[in-house]
Image (cartoon, rainbow, N blue to C red):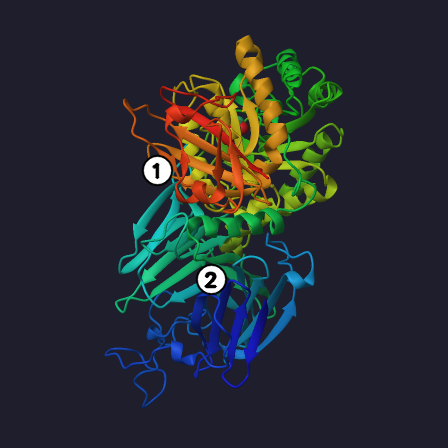
């Protein structure tokens, strides 16, 4: 890995074993993009990779030169007002109303490692030799404004982290758009992959061919959202899960975002990603600066799995942090679907006792334990025990449960308030919204202005009062509505445009303070299920509740999509009761578990109402997961066959030494007179021989990857506790063990 600067051509080459990223200083001083892709041999001059030709109507920079038009040159961080009339990467306004700036290369600095982004979540290094960083200063002579473009290349992953800092000079400026990344690609032969959906249908995999014009996704809801995840990929049409070129773009942020690909009439593609410009502006005084969040670009020529594995490795080991990062996650039981708001101490203790007997490790008390909360109209903001339900307080309950030998976890929704609460009665002005206008509610709740420090301080104090009891080792941090009227009472007019961003910084600040005070506390983020499953929150909470939809067949799709970017160790996945509360579907308990094993495993049902047989099955599943969770959560994950395109879906995890693998196979609908079926596996050692459980066969790794694993049902010879044969919603878990 290195970052080279060729003085003679003013060319920068960032490379590691897998990838190269090359750009240069153009003759007008701007930065031109030359190449991003598979590693190239270094040369001093790559300038021939840029094409120049006169184009009618083009705005040309130099008198007498008809071919230097920024509209037709690939750039690093394009500027409005210098000849490029495609979408720019930023927009800024001078006090005189002009939005024309002209940033040219001034200097650069190459350092080992990766500097922190103060107050923002970001990937990190643990030693200086894991990455190199270059910070390039661009300068606008007229206004004295500096732009700092920062790039980090990692040694062991095919990824580059990028962010931008705007540093105001001698005059003030209003930043109206500040994206984190631009990548100009030389052709348009791509399909755009997005993860799209809604509540209970998060992160569905969708491909659309790029067309001329703009293809974009976004969030303007104040959270990263379930509608679109802050991620896109551009893949070649022929790229599959296992083969072919793909570029991934992932935004390490939890608020509004924009991700778009613009194809021009000359068939080049411009990718932009960053904070959505809607409702965004930053008033910068001389000397002040604004730092964008970072984007992570990945290149892979090994298909979508290749791209995902780069994200998994980076996000699991160098974005997630702290005590839980490398630890297998506790098997939990959550009472939400078991009781909803209708519980008391006795009922909770009964569930916990049974859960303990079944081997479960962590009991999570969900919504309804605080204030007067018996339904969703009241008490958000009042984070003290509901003594009618819990006469010994939540702290007393937590002690009883920890005395049983279980860990105890607790639900909070710190950012929200109900009008019926002590918090709202005391601080009505802490709610976001214009006091002269109607405030929309969502689930009867209103949004606290987390851009205000005193609000965050209040929540910190309230939460610490509960957590200080010492019996709480897990928090589920929920957030159940989108922002609507974004106006902060008391905030000066020129700062209103920064409220949505500062809100997210307030969320990060509260997380950071709690993490610092309770370093062993395990956080699971949540937002009406999976509406804030994003890399920003992974920095604080190493796992996230993936969806309120716990139906196995639906979960297959949701987890399949989520795995495009996010590691298995981050994917909260529970076995719930049937008929399923979201779909009404009845699927076998084995299939529910076979899906949930590929995540941070748990249960979300009343174990006491199950049959003795199902209770024994749970006991066996818990024991099985304990034996295998390190492999599930930290092995190399491969998607094999998509539930979006195939009758049968499959995925697998492989141990680091490639000697053990687990293959999950799922078939939601039963056909009659089934055809022969096999699924080609991935990631095995072609030279090893594997014992394949269920089929009772010995197969070469090469056979399993080239010919495939026979999944025709007649081939199953020894069904085990994770096998469901016949009928709808059948599934199996094959174990592959290398034999000498
Ligand atoms: C939404 C979450 O996604 C659920 O799991 C649950 O915690 C409810 N909120 C509680 O109100």
Across and down, in percent, residue 288 comes to 60, 66
- Across the whole image, how many numbered discs are drawn on residues? 2
Q: Is residue 168 left or right of residue 306?
A: right
Crowd class of label 1 (few under 14; some 14 to 19; many from 20; radius 10 Å): some
Tell me where residue 301 sits by quadrant.
bottom left
| Mark carried by residue 203 | none
Where residue 268 appears, x then y in whole percent?
A: 32, 67
Q: Residue furthest front?
A: 740
Which residue occupies the extreme left position in the image?
56
Instruction: Assess whether mark 1 and mark 2 are in contact (beta carbons under 8 angstroms).
Output: no
Q: Residue at x 62, y 12 (%)?
A: 347
Which element type, helix, strand or loop, lies under badge 2?
strand
Q: First in sequence: mark 2 or mark 1?
A: 2
Q: Which mark is residue 181?
A: 2
Between 201 and 481, the one lying in front of the other is 201
Most foreground residue, 472 or 682: 682
Indicate the quadrant containing the N terminus: top left, top right, bottom left or bottom right.
Answer: bottom right
Q: Against 380, is 5 above or below?
A: below
Question: Is ligand 1 closer than 8 angstroms to the Cβ of mark 2?
Answer: no
Residue 144 in the image: above or below residue 304: below
**Res 328 quadrant in image:** top right
Nearer-the-camera pick, 261 or 62: 261
Q: Which label lies toward us, 2 or 1?
A: 1
Say whether residue 288 is left or right of residue 215: right
The residue carrying mark 1 is: 644
How far separated are the C-alphas under marks 2 and 1?
A: 30 Å
Dividing the image into 4 quarters, which one contains the C terminus?
A: top right
Identify the element where label 1 is drawn: loop
Q: Is residue 504 visible?
A: no
Res 425 quadrant in image: top right
């Amino acid at each position: 890995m290195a970052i080279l600067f060729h003085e003679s051509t003013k060319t920068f080459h960032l490379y590691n074993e897998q990838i190269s990223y090359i750009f240069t200083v153009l003759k007008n001083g701007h930065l031109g993009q030359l190449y991003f892709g598979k590693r190239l041999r270094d040369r001093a001059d790559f300038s021939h990779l840029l094409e120049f030709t006169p184009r009618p109507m083009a705005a040309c920079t130099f008198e007498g030169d008809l071919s230097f038009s920024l509209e037709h040159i690939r750039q690093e961080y394009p500027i409005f007002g210098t000849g490029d009339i495609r979408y720019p990467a930023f927009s800024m306004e001078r006090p005189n109303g002009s939005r024309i700036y002209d940033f040219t290369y001034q200097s650069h600095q190459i350092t080992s490692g990766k500097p922190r982004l103060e107050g923002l979540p970001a990937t990190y290094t643990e030693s200086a030799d894991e990455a190199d960083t270059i910070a390039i200063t661009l300068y606008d002579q007229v206004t004295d404004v500096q732009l700092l473009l920062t790039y980090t290349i990692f040694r062991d992953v095919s990824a580059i982290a990028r962010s931008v800092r705007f540093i105001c000079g001698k005059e003030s400026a209003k930043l109206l758009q500040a994206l984190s990344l631009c990548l100009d690609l030389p052709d348009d032969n791509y399909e755009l992959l997005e993860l799209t959906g809604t509540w209970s249908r998060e992160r569905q995999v969708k491909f659309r061919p790029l067309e001329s014009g703009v293809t974009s996704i976004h969030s303007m809801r104040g959270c990263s959202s379930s509608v679109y995840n802050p991620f896109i990929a551009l893949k070649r049409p022929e790229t599959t899960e296992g083969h072919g070129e793909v570029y991934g773009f992932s935004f390490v942020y939890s608020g509004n975002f924009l991700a778009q690909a613009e194809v021009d009439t000359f068939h080049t593609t411009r990718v932009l990603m960053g904070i959505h410009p809607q409702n965004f502006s930053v008033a910068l005084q001389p000397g002040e600066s604004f730092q964008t969040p970072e984007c992570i670009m990945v290149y892979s020529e090994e298909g979508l799995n290749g791209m995902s594995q780069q994200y998994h490795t980076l996000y699991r080991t160098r974005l997630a942090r702290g005590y839980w990062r490398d630890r297998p996650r506790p098997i939990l039981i959550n009472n939400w679907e078991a009781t909803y708001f209708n519980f008391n101490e006795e009922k909770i203790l009964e569930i916990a006792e049974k859960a303990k007997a079944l081997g479960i490790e962590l009991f999570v008390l969900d919504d309804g334990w605080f204030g007067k909360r018996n339904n969703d109209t009241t008490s958000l903001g009042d984070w003290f025990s509901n003594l009618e339900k819990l006469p010994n307080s939540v702290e007393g309950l937590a002690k009883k449960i920890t005395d049983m030998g279980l860990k105890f976890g607790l639900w909070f929704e710190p950012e929200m308030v109900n009008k019926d609460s002590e918090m709202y009665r005391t601080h009505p002005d802490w709610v976001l919204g214009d006091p002269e206008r109607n405030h929309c509610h969502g689930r009867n709740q209103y949004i606290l202005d987390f851009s205000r420090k005193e609000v965050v301080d209040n929540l910190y104090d309230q939460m610490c009062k509960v957590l200080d009891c010492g019996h709480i080792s897990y928090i589920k941090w929920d957030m159940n509505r989108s922002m609507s009227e974004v106006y902060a009472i008391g905030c000066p007019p020129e700062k209103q445009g920064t409220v949505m961003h500062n809100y997210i910084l307030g969320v990060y600040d509260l997380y950071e303070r709690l993490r610092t005070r309770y370093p062993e506390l395990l956080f699971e983020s949540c937002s009406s299920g999976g509406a804030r499953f994003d890399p920003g929150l992974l920095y604080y909470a190493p796992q996230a509740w993936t969806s309120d939809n716990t139906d196995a067949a639906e979960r297959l799709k949701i987890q399949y999509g989520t795995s495009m970017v996010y590691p298995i160790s981050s994917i909260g996945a529970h076995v719930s009761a049937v008929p399923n509360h979201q779909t009404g579907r009845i699927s076998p308990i084995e299939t529910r578990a076979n899906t949930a094993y590929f995540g941070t495993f748990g249960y979300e049902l009343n174990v006491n109402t199950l049959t003795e047989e199902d209770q024994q099955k749970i006991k066996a599943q818990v024991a099985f997961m304990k034996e295998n969770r390190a492999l599930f959560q930290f092995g190399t994950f491969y998607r094999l066959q998509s539930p979006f395109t195939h009758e049968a879906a499959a995925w697998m995890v492989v141990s680091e030494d490639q000697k053990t693998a687990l293959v999950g196979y799922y078939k939601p609908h039963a056909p009659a007179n089934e055809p022969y079926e096999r699924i080609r596996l991935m990631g095995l050692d072609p030279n090893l021989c594997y014992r394949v459980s269920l089929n009772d066969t010995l197969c070469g790794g090469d056979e399993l990857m080239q010919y495939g694993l026979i999944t025709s049902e007649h081939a199953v010879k020894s069904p085990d506790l994770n096998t469901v044969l016949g009928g709808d919603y059948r599934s199996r878990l094959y174990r592959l063990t290398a034999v000498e």
